[in-house]
Amino acid sequence: MLSIKNLTVNINDKQILKGINLEIKPGEIHAIMGPNGSGKSTLSHVLSGKDGYTVTGGSVTYQGKDLLAMAPEIRAREGVFLAFQYPVEIPGVSNVYLLKAGLNAIRKYHGQSEVDAMDFLTLVKEKVRLLEMDEKFLYRAVNEGFSGGEKKRNEILQMAILEPKLCILDETDSGLDIDALKIVSEGVNSLRSPTRSFVIVTHYQRLLDYIKPDFVHVLAHGQIVKSGGAELALELEEKGYSWVEEATA
Amino acid sequence: MSASTKEIESLIGQGYKQGFITELETDSFLPGLDETVIRKLSRLKNEPEFMTEYRLKAFRHWQTMKSPEWAFVKFDAIDYQKISYYSAPKRKEDGPKSLDEIDPQVLEAYKKLGIPLDEQERLAGVAVDAVFDSVSVATTFKGKLKEAGVIFCPISEALRAHPALVEQYLGTVVPPGDNFFAALNSAVFSDGSFVYIPKGVRCPMELSTYFRINAANTGQFERTLIIADEGSHVSYLEGCTAPMRDENQLHAAVVELIALDNAQIKYSTVQNWYPGDKDGKGGIYNFVTKRADCRGENAKVSWTQVETGSAITWKYPSCILTGDNSVGEFYSVALTNNYQQADTGTKMIHIGKNTRSTIISKGISAGKAQNTYRGLVKVLKSAENARNYTQCDSLLIGDKCGAHTFPYVEVRQPSAQVEHEATTSKISEDQLFFCQQRGLSAEDAVSMIVNGFCKAVFKELPMEFAVEAQALLGLSLEGSVG
């Protein structure tokens, strides 16, 4: 599904990612862990096409195509989804409108007709129940006046509606209390499928108690310094990041 | 990057869709303005004597006036002797009696604009007066309106058929010497719409006027007069377009609304005059005086405007709240892109007791455009318990445009309540990226964000217009990102 080879990325001439290699197969969940400033968010931004990053070397192949050559909206339409660490507010634009516009843009790209209004509503309401959200959320302006937890749940709602193939969760657990964390995790788990892959970027191990990864990678100083199974996360929790940082220093 | 850039470029290529020129034979005056021209114009239109005198008086007054300089707009001085003050498609002696007699080219032009004048093709429920350069070429559904007692006709026709009504009300809201452009309009206005809704009548359909400037070097001086008699209701829509020309063209209109006791007028405008090209060449100077008088008790007037066109817009649809308990509303979206300039807003003059006014203004600037809100809320001593609420929001797209707000408040009555809220925001890169990450193109994302920003105003527009306005905003913003 996704193949990252020797990826190097700069922000304003400063090298942030120093040669990332990662292979993700359909249906796999990969957790990327690492201390602050290790390049975790940079990686998720570069994969989703955010401005302000310069790719200086390496390649990213997504479903056999050159991901880095695609505009952000094309990546989205091809099935790459980023759940934002800090979801933005869009005053005056209702949540349901954004969802419908996004879904239709994706459908159009794949040569499908626009979704029928009634079908769409049925779909959205089903997903809203799944995430234990109030239906009122749908008619409120996107993220405006939402609490931190509500914003994150809203991200997962969008993911559930747009049905991407590659989901990147950028520190989705940050700012969540334990109840919200559970709901978000259940939402993610319900979306697991043999054809859908996840990249879960997180600082803490606790999210991985709820979403069980197939692989855990530790990112430090712009490089993956250690990879392993789910047990690696527990080891990290116990020993701290200094353990891997020292081991590679 | 590849796909999106192409997409955006193809969108920009569309540009201004109404920019075509209709080639036809016209009856036009040579450029120039003096008393002879005015007499000739008045004679050509078979006007009653009082009208000729009205025009001449206005002209003499205009000559003593100076073009206003207080607005936050820049343009080269206009040479009023280089403008032709009359241009009309050539036609038979008595003017067209039916659609068959109208120049097919003119009909075609309206059809291209999406305004078929054939009643069968029109959506039922909207009557249209089509003004082409200086004359009205057709008014639809006249028969049906007549049954209800509603008069809806070109003002030139009203001057011949209902001179007393026109004389009673014309210039009573905007006096001939009100301001420079109003004085000029009073001297040389050529056509526009006249509406009279009799007592207690709810107008059975929306009335609309579609203004089209076609001829080069011609000014359009439209004059509209709407009278809503006691207890009547009317909703009036106005749309405007012009061809793309390299020279600036002047549009100096005057619109007067009069609402008597318990009457309601809703006046909606979607203004899409040619804005000039992306380097600021050409475009319409839209210098307009629009004012309503809530003359009776419980009268209500609401202005809703969506201003996306014109090189320069100078316009302040206002309400004089004379009658006790009368209500004035102003809902405005003004969008400027490239080198467009807009200085627009409203005046709410509270005279009667318990008068209320609401102002919601949304200004959007993109490119190198300047967008100014200028508003006056004036509460006179007599206006006990007057209330005003003003909300004035500006949205900036990019970092080379400007937004300016000049709210004036004058209150002489201690029981009055006046509220003013204002915000300025910018479409952030994060908002754009977020929408793109959900599959929307950058252009669609901007359009969605801007439409969200304007929501409070769009919901005031009649349904059909709201859809057009949304589409228009998207079109006017093309090329503002990327």
Image (cartoon, grey):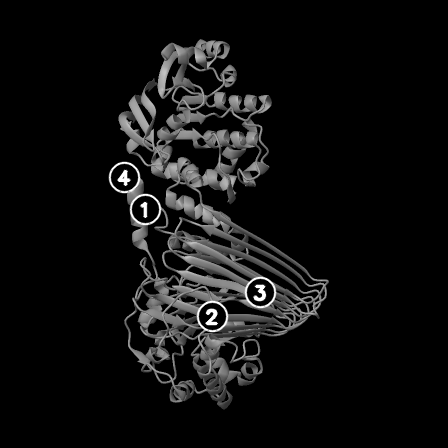
- Residue B376, numbered circle: 3
Q: Residue at x 70, y 68 (%)?
A: B383
- Residue B288, numbered circle: 2
Chain identity of mark 4:
B
Q: Cα distance, mark 4 to mark 2?
A: 44 Å
Question: In which quarter of the view is residue B442 placed?
Answer: top left
Density class for disc 3 (Cα within 10 Å; few <14, some 14-19, many ≥20) is: some
Q: Which residue is mark 4?
A: B2
Q: Do callouts 2 and 3 mark residues in contact (Cβ within 8 Å)?
A: no
Q: Regarding mark 2 in the picture, which secondary structure is present there?
A: strand
Residue A236 screen position, x and y as percent? 46, 12
Density class for disc 2 (Cα within 10 Å; few <14, some 14-19, many ≥20) is: many
Q: Earlier in the sequence, mark 2 or mark 3?
A: 2
- Residue B8, numbered circle: 1
Residue B258 left/right relative to B220: right
Residue B197 screen position, x and y as percent? 58, 73
Residue B437 screen position, x and y as percent? 40, 35
Q: Amino acid at mark 4?
A: Ser
Q: Amino acid at mark 2?
A: Val
Chain identity of mark 2:
B
